[in-house]
Image (spheres, coloured by chain):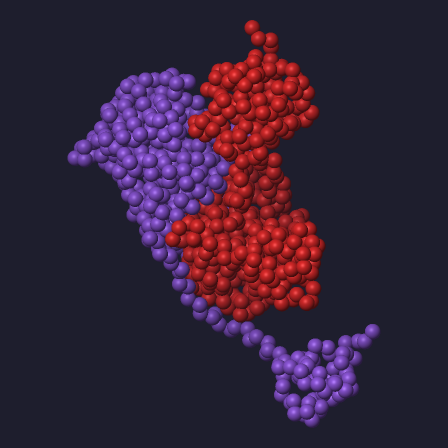
Chain colours: A purple, B red
Amino acid sequence: MKTLGEEAEKEKKAATELSGLLEVLGLEGEREVELEDVELSANELVLLPSVLASAALKAVVPPARLAPPKAKPTTILEAPFTPFLQEYSGQIREVTLGATKSEGGSRGKTVVIGGATTPAFYLFEKTPPHPPVIAVDTFDMKVTLPKAIRMHVEEVWEDTAAWAKMAVEKWGVDVLTVHLLSTDPLIKDTPPAEAAKTVEEVLQAVDVPLIIGGCGDPKKDAKVFTKVAEVAEGERVLLSSLTLDMDEAGVLDGVAKAAGKYGHLVLGFTALDLNRAKELNRKLYEYVPEGNILMDLTTAALGYGLEYSFTIHERARMAALMGDKELQHPVLAGTTNAWAAREAWMKLGPEWEPRSLRGPLWETLTALTLLVAGVDMFMMMHPDAVSNMKKIIQRLMTRGKAKPDKIANWVMQRYRRK
Amino acid sequence: MTEREIKKGVKKLSPIDVYMLLPRTNCKECGEPNCMAFAAKLVNREVSLEECPPILKKEHEKAYKKLQETLAPVIKEITIGTKEHAVKIGGKLVMYRHEFTYHNPVALAFDVTDEMPLHPRFSEEEALIDRVKKVENFLYNYIGRDLNLDMIAIRSTSNDPATFKSAVENVAKVTNLPLILCALDPNVMEAGLAAVQNRRPLIYAATKDNWSNMAELALMYDCPLTIFAPNDLDLLKSLSKTMIEYGVEDLVLDPGTFPDEGLSDTINNFTMVRRNACKGGDNVLGFPLIGVPITVWFGKEDSKEMLAWEEACLASILTSRYADVLIIHSLDGWVQLPTVIWKFNIYTDPRKPVAVEPELKTFGKPDEMSPVMLTTNYALTYFTVESDLKKFGGNYYLIVADTEGISVESAVAGRYLTAESIAEAVKKSGVAEKVKHKYLIIPGMAARLSGETEDELKNVGLPGWRVIVGPRDSSGIAKLLEEKWPPKEED
């Protein structure tokens, strides 16, 4: 076998001989021609001048000059940062919950959500016009609740108005949800008139805007919501929720009409499907003003499909901002669903304790994830989860408060002794 | 612009573009029937280019290079550690998960300091070896999969080269996990690097003050290098450009993780950097981002629980907002459980269906007296039930009803799961011919359907079948069976 040295020597020799030959042939400088086979000897080439003329000389040409070793920079090379900004043609509609006396209702104040013109908390493009809002859940009956939540409501959970009052006074909630769960035909089958009475009691007990939740039975919900709409005329309560199943059951038109007639808001619920969300909205537009419609795109708990909810909310928001009018509604997430995750409440062994923190953290992180995906309003339950979300929302609303000095030397920071 | 158009802009790559560069010999050496099929899989990132043996030959060198460029992710993939103990970060193809899918799950690194004792001297003292072991041994079985933690970050709080070196040696001795070495003094860093020459740790970090020395170290030890420019994106980009020019090619960017009021800046900086790289074609910023939630622990008087809670929130929001690696302190189970689960979830492929095949599943070796249960075909519901049944052991039939991939509670509410559809599913499964008893266990969340279902079962030709309402959560199945199986003869 030839050594590398021999090979190089041979090439060098061939090159020398060839360059002489090229001179003779007047081809000096024809460097674009390439020699494909460096094994060809000068002698063979001499025998084949026609080949030479068209052939190639890669090896023969003096080796391409090596780039000089890159000089290492001695100072920082300036490269100013310019954020890549995007144009959005769409805007999320603004929706007002509740109505004050002068507006035809009896609420102490109203709450506005929506209005976004950029993805969630892209403050480098624009500060959101309204911070997302949290509504706290109450029920019209004693319900099965995880211990971590139960301990906070046990004293009031058989009196809906008292529960509502406590939530507003003790936790300072901005919007309150009353789930009329007892109307479920398979639970107590509370009649619509009685359920509506509960709503009236809560309207008397507190002055924050209300969300009225049903039991999930499309026909019964339609009846209950229709009655509630009537007794709460002008209060701009949010009916949660109207569905395509109501349409299939032939009851959607009636309840939507009642909501429109008495000036309430409706929440359109669909299961992780934007086409169906749009379809439902088109049906609602017939009876309800566009500015009175919110969407619930389905909230799955962390660990139980939250990623599907996250992605459907990101997609919906992006499509809305890009101009899809049928998706330009504020969205609501039922983040209390976080408690459906067994990791939120189940005993898993001492290394995963305390559950009193794990549960509310679970609810907080479920909500937080959807917050950055663009959710405008949350239904929540645990007081610590609610207060933490409020704090985070407040922090996300203002830019320019980072303190670089504080973290500049984090690497060397010692932990505080207990 | 519609959503579809945006997507197209992102996914410019078509299988045809890729096919044209492949050898197009349909040699099948890659295991695919032809080059077009291989191209389609390449575009979907289901195979790697190197699985095509011919493309690696000399005559295809140009095409190989071109394909490498064509397929290169907008965020460079960086390897920390070596061989089977390496972790890959970055490698992202898109900014938003729905545009394609996210690759290389965010790596979770946990800190030790070079001043920690090797073992605790009093109860609850944080100690080096104990923490490393805790990171290594962390395990949670989530729907049949083991979730773990990924890396160790060693911080020099002493700022003393010998102390740091010894801590790095001690950590390297007891673990194969990939490492991040954290020291801003190049002399300290070099002492640490010298202790783990073959481990390819991530260097943290080059700053405006130490950048040239850190660049030299990165080149000398062939390690990836972090650039730390807290809340200064001009500096971050300038340093990145400088490092590339210097010859350091594997970079990780830290625009700073600010706790408390700095949260908004943190998220906006991460978003701006990632967006410039993904949408603005800013190659200088096309590197993985490192989030540092551990910063919540310093300079505050809050309780440990409060700080751990805040750290979990930061880790979660940064996992959703573009961090490729995180440095965290708390090792408490209640903090890490949601962190590892969200990390797992957000990196699943959104193109994969949410549903599993509706069919009759068997567990163990069911016989004619084994329980018959029913659940929905929502993937997460199914996998939860599956993992519980496997955990309990024993023999069961499980009918997976077609609810179009909706969970039990929503399926009942939305009437995807009705008495009729349950009866149909039982009938179709053929389970009635396999068992001698006539009992069906339905999920507790579907309790309201129990009476009606018995009627419907009659209607589909299964008279005498009775419904037992199971627990609301499948973890309660073992207890239910203990109490109610085999069922007593009906009164």
Q: Position of residue B195 (x, y in %)?
A: 65, 58
Q: Is residue B385 left or right of residue A243?
A: right
> In the displayed structure, would residue A226 be above or below residue B85?
above
> In the displayed structure, would residue A392 be above or below residue A147?
below
Q: Quadrant of residue B181?
A: bottom right
Q: Going by the picture, which residue comes out furthest to the bottom?
A: A24
Q: Quadrant of the N terminus of chain A?
A: bottom right
Q: Position of residue B200 (x, y in %)?
A: 63, 58
Which is more toward the observer, A33 or A19? A33
Q: Going by the picture, which residue comes out furthest to the front?
A: A50
Q: Quadrant of residue A289?
A: top left
Q: Going by the picture, which residue comes out furthest to the left?
A: A102
Which residue appears at 28% of the width and 43% of the height?
A94
> In the displayed structure, would residue A382 be above or below residue A30?
above
Which residue appears at 20% of the width and 34% of the height?
A100
> In the displayed structure, would residue B32 be above or below residue B456?
below
Q: Is residue A72 left or right of residue A395?
A: right
Q: Position of residue A16 (x, y in %)?
A: 72, 88
Q: Position of residue B187 (x, y in %)?
A: 58, 63
Q: Is residue B81 left or right of residue A191?
A: right
Which is more toward the observer, B55 or A405? B55
Q: Is residue B264 visible?
A: no
Which residue appears at 43% of the width and 29% of the height?
B414
Which is more toward the observer, A16 or A49? A49
Q: Is residue A26 visible?
A: yes
Which residue appears at 33% of the width and 46% of the height?
A325
